[in-house]
Amino acid sequence: MDAITVNQLSKTFRVKVKEKGLKGSLKSIFQPEYKSIQAVKDISFQVKEGEILAFIGPNGAGKSTTIKMLTGILYPEQGEAMVMGINPALKRKQLSYQIGTVFGQKEQLWMHLTPYDNFKFFGTIYDLKDHEVEARIEELKQVFELEEFINTPVRNLSLGQRIRCEIVASLIHRPKVLFLDEPTIGLDPVVKENIRALIKKMNREYKTTIFLTSHDVGDIEKLCKRIIIVNHGRIVLDDSMENLKYHYLKKKVVELKLRDAVDLSDEDGITVLKSKGNNVKLEIDTTKKDISDALKLIDADNILDINISNIPLENIITEIYKENRQTLMKGSDTP
Amino acid sequence: MRKYLFICKATLMESLQYVMNIALGFISFFMMVFVFINLWNYIYSDPSKLISGYSRGQMIWYVILTEILWYGTRNRTLTVQISDDIKSGTIAYGLNKPYHYIVYIIAKHIGEIALKFVLFLGAGLVIGLIFVGPIRDFSPLRLPLILLSLLLGILINSFIRMAISVLSFWIEDCFPFHWIYDKLLILVGIMFPVEVFPQWAQPIIRCSPIYVVSYGPAKLVIDYNYSTALEILLAQLIYLAVSFILLMLFYQKGVKRVNVNGG
């Protein structure tokens, strides 16, 4: 069954524009001008129950606007979304019992209360009975390892501890779908790893559907099996991580440490990324040239060390963004 | 209802962390009351004299009671927080929670002022008893009606302040409106009872929120009679309904304008 169904969803914002300088400020009082910005354009997709989906894109791509429409915060202008069979635009209060939200940049916890009191608060607003809240806190305390700081006021917690509590607060009412909007923003690598492990554990143990937006490629790579990339309000890629890697990991990076320096230049299928003294870094397009053929350019006895790696996912995503931008630019050039 | 009671309780728990802040508020309260005690002592050189029908004791008790209402119910949640929530878009994040934002804020406000109000009430009563003595002809039997009037006054004041703050959906800064309301309340409603003002101004004041927010509850304590009590309670009920309808109307209209772009 689909947990989320999105059908041709669109959203346009009306933004005030002002000419520069004092004259422009005065003019905007008497003759205000507005321009329309289409943040989300006709997007459609489905998310299955229990799936972890990465919904990514550059700043201003329309990710957060989509999340806000799916959680009932914003009304769509066109199209329809259904989350657990409920239309967020029509029944957002009813939907709130089915979903949890964590906005990495917007805390929902009460800073002067302890996590325990916060969880009691969230349990009560979701109409859970006292004994149910207690049992749920106990359960989540174990899963998210909160024992050490559950009775410390939130304002005294570290960012990592706070994010863990934010996630727990959003899980207290056993939501079927969890929306995570940049949950690891500002966290150090160790804490990020910890949060990712907990998200994975939560998905495994409670079968919670997770809709994740993040700029952190590590989050996407380690958590998600499916990825949707949006840019300029449109979906530019909707594929499994496996397919993404298979199609886009055609290029390999070969790093060589040589005994004697050699003079290499770009040729079909080979790009010299770096050539400094005895160290050389090549990018090889395996559809045009095999790695073995590329290595034949260098005398085997001259090679001291070699490292062959895939292009980082971050670069792949950047490339997809760029490709999309070029396509759009070409489209706008066409009369 | 249970969730709103819990919000109230959670806020009370939070405010208990800041008892020192409330204690600091007493300094300004004591100064104001001290100034007015001396002012009325000077004006009433003859203690048996009546001004606008009030004795010296009644006049000082009036100021003490209205000051308790002023200091004990002042709160940034109704003014700054609502405006900030609207301007920053934070209000949108409460829309997909299973509570009503306006009722949530009222519950939070009551939780925040509960302790403060009780402390100021206690302090005000002690000062009054020391400097003026017991209130003349006061009967504990009137307490239920007086408490009801106090509660209604506090609620009306909250609704009016919230309605002003909700204007932030349309205007950048609603502080000037709060400022005008504050000054009117202080100058006309807190320092002097309605009867002290010129005859021509009295009907205007009696129709204003000042009559139901500060004058009414204080009047019932210092100069109770059955018909005045009925008149004040009726006026409070009308004001309560009108201010609540206006507040909800502004909110429902405004919340449709919520626009949160970006992450």
Image (cartoon, grey):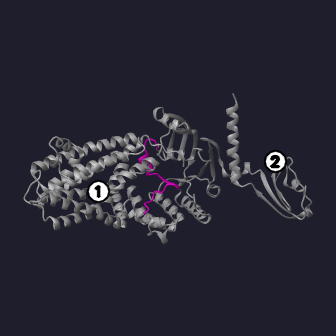
Q: Which amino acid does label 1 sit on?
A: Thr
The answer to whether the residue labelled 1 contacts the one labelled 2, judged by CB atoms less than 8 Å apart, is no
Residue interval drawn in magenta: A88-111
Label 1, label 2: how far apart the Cα atoms are: 74 Å
Q: Which residue lies furthest to the bottom in this view?
A: A148
Q: Residue A287 carries which label?
A: 2
Q: Residue furthest left?
A: B48
- Do the dots labelled 1 and 2 sit on one chain? no
Q: Residue furthest top?
A: A335
Q: What residue type is labelled 2?
A: Thr
Q: Is residue B195 magenta?
A: no
Looking at the image, can residue B199 be seen?
A: yes
Q: Does the magenta stretch include residue A98?
A: yes
Residue in front for this viewpoint, B63 or B108: B63
Q: In which quarter of the image is residue A113?
A: bottom left
- Disc 1 is attached to a residue of which chain? B
Is A9 on the left or on the right of B97, as rendered? right
Q: Residue A174 in the image: x percent, y percent?
A: 46, 57
Which residue is depicted at the point 55% across and 57% down? A183
Q: Mark 1 points at which residue?
A: B73
Which residue is depicted at the point 21% across and 43% down? B238
